Image (cartoon, rainbow, N blue to C red):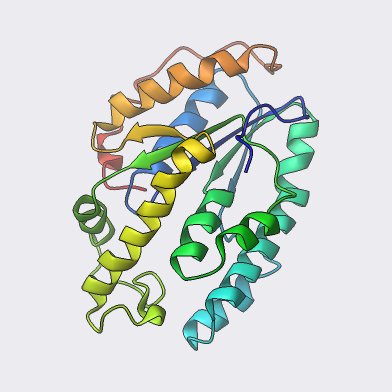
Amino acid sequence: METYGKHKYPGRLFIVEGVDGSGKSTQIALLRQWLISEGYTVFFSEWNSSPLVKKTTSKGKQKQLLTPTTFSLIHATDFADRTERDIIPPLKAGAIVLADRYIFTAFARDVARGVDRQWVRELYQFAVQPTLAFYFRVPLDISLSRILTGRTELKYYEAGMDLGLSSDRYESFKLFQQRIVSEYEAMVAECNLTVMDATRSIPEQQRRMRRLVKPYLHGVRCLHAPIQETAVVDGAQWLESGG
């Protein structure tokens, strides 16, 4: 699979990837605030959010009817719908699109569930190449503790219980997530992912993201002059468990 670089549209596409609890959602939310404050037009898209398939996915999960291949096809349908409605139009207009999870989530999760690696990649051949793809690397014990902050148990599919890895939900989660991590790590070089150390502080990570994003903003039209910089990063400690 070829590495990801510049796409054909005048806009920019920045995406974040990583296991649940890696803090990626917190970082892309902060990046969004900053870009807007700098005067850019910003659109946002997140994984499995298309109204076209959301109800189907929810029902399938509730009744535990989803096979790995069905899961893969549903997510590809969701992604295709969002690409057509939420991603390509803003990019064509020269705006910035931020995505919380992208095709690499499918590459990692579907393969971890036993779906053929090459088949999944071919399924997403229509995807727009990201301008920059961030991968938030985090130890599994940290991600698990973050996920369980504020709730007491893991969801059935989240824990990979459909795979029969372990009868214990927490052990199953660890084994399933380790498979996902292995896929992500293999994609770092293959898909040109920019690795972020998700164990560092929120402000440290955000400052690095901004430094890496800035060179790609040249030529992107601003709607207004930058708003005076606020303590968006330094005041973000309350978001520490996000992601």
What residue is at 39 percent from the left and 45 percent from the top?
185
Q: 28 above or below 65?
A: above
Q: Is residue 54 left or right of residue 89?
A: left
Q: 3 above or below 68?
A: above
What residue is at 36 percent from the left and 21 percent from the top?
207
Q: Is residue 142 left or right of residue 26?
A: left
Can the viewer see residue 50 in this picture? no
Q: Quadrant of the N terminus?
A: top right
- Give coordinates of residue 86: x percent, y percent: 71, 47
Q: 229 above or below 36?
A: above
- Give coordinates of residue 143: x percent, y percent: 26, 53
Figure disc tally: 0
What residue is at 45 percent from the left and 21 percent from the top?
210
- Give coordinates of residue 105: x percent, y percent: 51, 54
Can the viewer see residue 63 in this picture? yes
**Location of residue 163 (image quadrant):** bottom left
Residue placed most toward the observer, 163 or 52? 163
- Give coordinates of residue 38: x percent, y percent: 55, 17
What residue is at 33 percent from the left and 47 percent from the top?
22
